[in-house]
Image (cartoon, grey):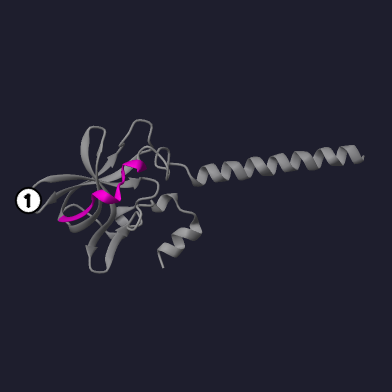
Amino acid sequence: MYRFSKLILLLLCFLALGTAGSTMAQDRSGLDGWGKDSEYNKHYQLSEHDEFKGNVAEITEINPLPGMAPGIGLKVKDQDGDMVDVQLGPKSFVKPDSIGLKKGDRVKVKGSWAQIGGKDVFMASKVKKSENVELKVRRTKDGMPFWAMSPEELAKERE
């Protein structure tokens, strides 16, 4: 009887660990290739930090590097008339509609210039639609992506 109880307890522990592991995997789904220390995020350089204003020409789905989960990007026509490819972050995290962002909106974009996949792109940290309406996707001070933060870190950033 003791041996049988021990076996059941051991089986329950394995089931609990398996459930916890699959829950963690589900919480991070849609983030393949977008991790804090990923090849992609290494392109975000504070030394290349910049900002510009323009009009949203298109909201697009992007795949910056092979094997990455889909992401969200913008095509923004800047004040000089140039089209800038802006990369916001993973589709599972970035929700432009949360601020009502749409084609034609005037925006101010902050972030870092990079060359990814042979193209010049702008990796956004923040897209500001108006004085009180903005979409933040990275910490400005160090480029830490919000999608790579723990729920506690993210809550602190959004305070």
In the image as oriented, which residue stretches furthest toward the left? Answer: 80
Q: Nearer the viewer, residue 131 or 125?
A: 125
Mark 1: secondary structure: loop
Which residues make up the magenta segment? 41-53
Is 104 above or below relative to 75?
below
In the rendered image, which quarter is residue 61 located in? top left
Please name the residue that numbered disc 1 is placed on: 80
Where is residue 48 shown, x and y percent of the image?
Answer: 24, 49
Where is residue 100 shown, x and y percent of the image?
Answer: 27, 59
In the rendered image, which quarter is residue 2 located in? top right
- Quadrant containing the N terminus is top right
Q: Nearer the viewer, residue 18 or 127?
A: 127
Where is residue 96 shown, x and y percent of the image?
Answer: 30, 53
Left-right relation of 155 to 140: right
Is 108 above or below relative to 121?
below
Left-right relation of 156 to 108: right
Q: Nearer the viewer, residue 112 or 23?
A: 112
- Three-letter code, disc 1: Asp
- Quadrant containing the C terminus is bottom left
Label 1 Cα crowd, 10 Å radius (few <14 / some 14-19 / many 20+): few
Give the residue displayed 27% in from the left and 69% down from the top: 132
